[in-house]
Image (tube, grey):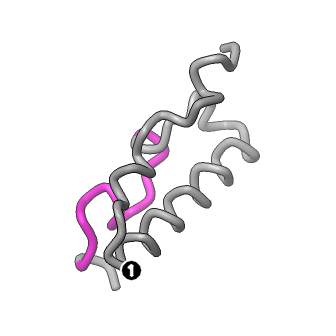
Amino acid sequence: MPGSYPPKLDEFDVADWWVKDPEDPTEVEYARIRWRVARRTYDEGGDWESHLLMPAWWAFRGN
């Protein structure tokens, strides 16, 4: 239910999920998957903030 999550989980925003190219549908979908997993982790009482960390592959990806 919207409004019951912390701000970064309430609405999906590519800026919160380490997306380099917002026009790349694969990258955006991967970010949406991470967002949904973070929401589920929050619902289950887990460490949802760990999902906000930079993915290991992100730093090595070219621009």
Q: Residue at x 64, y 47 (%)?
A: 28
36 in magenta: no
Residue 22: image x %, image y %?
60, 37
What x and y, as percent, mark residue 35?
49, 59
User: Which is nearer the eye, 35 or 23?
Assistant: 35
Q: Total marks drawn?
A: 1
Helix, strand or loop at label 1? It is loop
Which quadrant is home to the N terminus? bottom left
Could you tell me which quadrant the C terminus lies in? top right
Residue, x 25% and y 59% (percent of image)?
Answer: 7
Position of residue 16 in the picture relative to residue 28 (left or right):
left
Q: Which residues are magenta?
A: 4-15
Where is 16 relative to 46, above or below? above
Q: Vertical placement of 52 versus 63: above or below?
A: below
- Name, please, the residue furthest toward the bottom: 1
Neighbor class of circle 1 (other Cα within 10 Å; few <14, some 14-19, many 20+) is: few
- Residue at image position (24%, 64%) is 6
The spot of residue 14 in percent (x, y) is: 49, 45
**Residue at the spot of label 1:** 44
Q: Residue furthest front?
A: 46
Q: Amino acid at mark 1?
A: Glu
- Place of residue 29 in the rendered image (x, y in percent of width and height, measured from the top left): 67, 54
Residue 5 location, quadrant: bottom left
Q: State the image quarter where residue 46 is shown.
A: bottom left
Residue at horizontal 72 percent and vertical 38 percent from the top: 24
